[in-house]
Amino acid sequence: MFSLLQLASTSIENAVAGALIPPESSGILKQAKLQEAPDAVHVSSLTNLLPCLARTVALISAASIGAEIRAAELSLNVADMPRVATVDPRFQSYNIEMVEVTGGRFWRPYASTDAPAGPNPDLFAERAPIDLGDARLRRLAAALSPAYLRVSGTWANSTFFADSDTPPSAPPAGFKGTLTRQQWRGVIDFSRAVDAPVVTSFAISAGTRNTKGVWIPEQAQHLLAYTRSINGRIAAAEFMNEPDLPAIGGAPDGYDASAYARDFAAFRAFIKQAAPDVTILGPGTAGTGADAEALFAASAQDVDAISYHHYGALSARCGGDRTPEAALADGWLARSENTFAFYRLLRDRLAPGKPLWLTETAEAACGGNRWAATFLDSFRYLDQLGRLAKAGVQVVMHNTLAASDYGLLDERTHEPRPNYWAALLWRRLMATTVLDTGTALQPGIHLYAHCARDIPSGVALLVINNDREKPHELALPAASQRYTLASKHLGDGTVQLNGRTLTLDSEDQLPSLPGEAIPAGTITLAPATITFLVVAEAHNADCR
């Protein structure tokens, strides 16, 4: 007891000077300090002393934490963070390309023995149809749900739906690929099994047009009718994939905004009559130039939600010049926000109030670069989710779930890549209510906040230290659970959570992903790391 009193009274002299504790506590402690021996302190005096002592120690502790918080680089008041947006429960979603479903030529992974080293006429590899019944694929996809599954892509524009149990051996004239009933049933079965309703687009190539070159909905009608016949559901649809790239997308020669406007009007009339419960998306463009703007104007009034695509660059396959050294650069991470700003401006001018969906995105177009399969790209992946959620984008669909270098999963083994583990943590920790952290993005440290998933009044933070050399500090006034993603070698395809390498367990199941308990105070964020912090006792009124 005497040593405790000595410690408290020594500390209290400084605390009193700062008016941190009441004078009566100071007086009692000083009297105790003047006693010559512990047995001189009477039991009755101790009884009066202990409540004041407890209060004093608590105040000293609070003062110490407060000093830490004031000294930290960033300090947050999680209780008062206001709600700024709410995203769709299926905000984090993904693509399986139509050509994966049908089989055909898709971007050749760099891991292939004959993969292209740069621009190469042989950019593609022939692939068999994806096995959507694969147990590992289904289990890992289900862990990201609820989500949307988009089945579309460039190849969908010219894919013939063979509405027969005996499909043709080759696509009919005016088409380049064939989707069978069995393959589409596989998509619907997968969608139900993993809780990911289907988003798609329809064929628009020469085989879907009359003698005047006008699109007719016969193929779309067959696909919708068959979907209903097997108790399937299409949640949302774009008319076509990327109408601003008509030459590579199977559209007729000279296809422009006026032709698109004509065809889109026919598409909308058809959907409203044949499937009024389907959300109409558009225009699904990939650019930010005059063509994209004209196509946007042609359809904005008649869509239910605005859709667009974003790739920050071309991969090396298609002549891109990005390097892994730039993967963490602030300017690179900001590119998705720049594209969003273009579409938000058009939306606000031509279709105010309509929601925005990013229906296709990844590290780079044309299959992604080599490092798209490594932890280097997880900074872009999570930063994009944080930025766009705060901006109010409702859905973000990564391309792809399991194909080429930008897949969340390896296309041959379906082993999770670093972006999959990043996606899984987002899914488990971040709820749909988006909060304002009260701090602007700073070079080298990006901070986002949501309500914590399944924790009333709790707050979940995403803190990205994209500085390769410098640690950063963040102070919190309450205890938290910490989940830090890092990689010993940023480009080798492995990732650690709180120091433990993430991999499927011996029974092919996802491992537990425990956090590390962190007390209130200052948290150091190591260079090139991504940290989620869940503050259960945040007492945030917008998260009740």
Image (cartoon, rainbow, N blue to C red):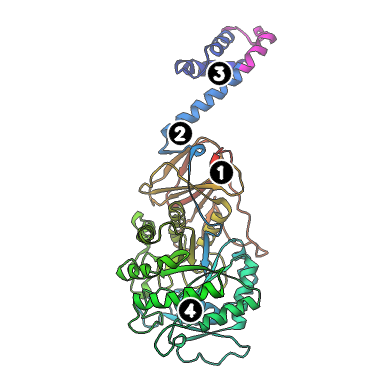
Element carrying mark 2: helix
Q: Earlier in the sequence, mark 4 or mark 1?
A: 4
Q: Nearer the viewer, mark 2 or mark 1?
A: 1
What's the magenta region?
Answer: 34-51
Sort mark 1 into few (<14), some (14-19) or many (20+) by Cα contacts within 10 Å.
Answer: many
Q: Secondary structure at mark 4?
A: helix
Give the amino acid type for the residue marked by disc 1 in the picture. Cys
Q: Residue at x 46, y 74 (%)?
A: 239
Of pointers 4 and 2, the one earlier in the residue sequence: 2
Q: Which residue is mark 1?
A: 543
In reply to whether residue 45 is colored magenta, the answer given is yes
In this figure, which residue is indicated by the disc labeled 3? 8
Q: CA distance from mark 3 to mark 2?
A: 23 Å
When the figure is inspected, residue 379 is found, relative to residue 95, above or below; the finding is above
Q: Earlier in the sequence, mark 2 or mark 1?
A: 2
The residue shown at (58%, 47%) is: 515
User: Is the residue marked by circle 2 packed among few (<14), some (14-19), or many (20+) residues within 10 Å?
Assistant: many
| Residue pointed to by mark 2 | 69
Contact check, label 4 and label 1, Cβ < 8 Å: no
Q: Element type at marker 3?
A: helix
The CA span between labels 2 and 1 is: 23 Å
Q: Residues within 10 Å of mark 3 (few under 14, many from 20)?
A: many
Visible residue check, residue 414: yes
Mark linked to residue 156? 4
Q: Position of residue 487 (x, y in %)?
A: 48, 56
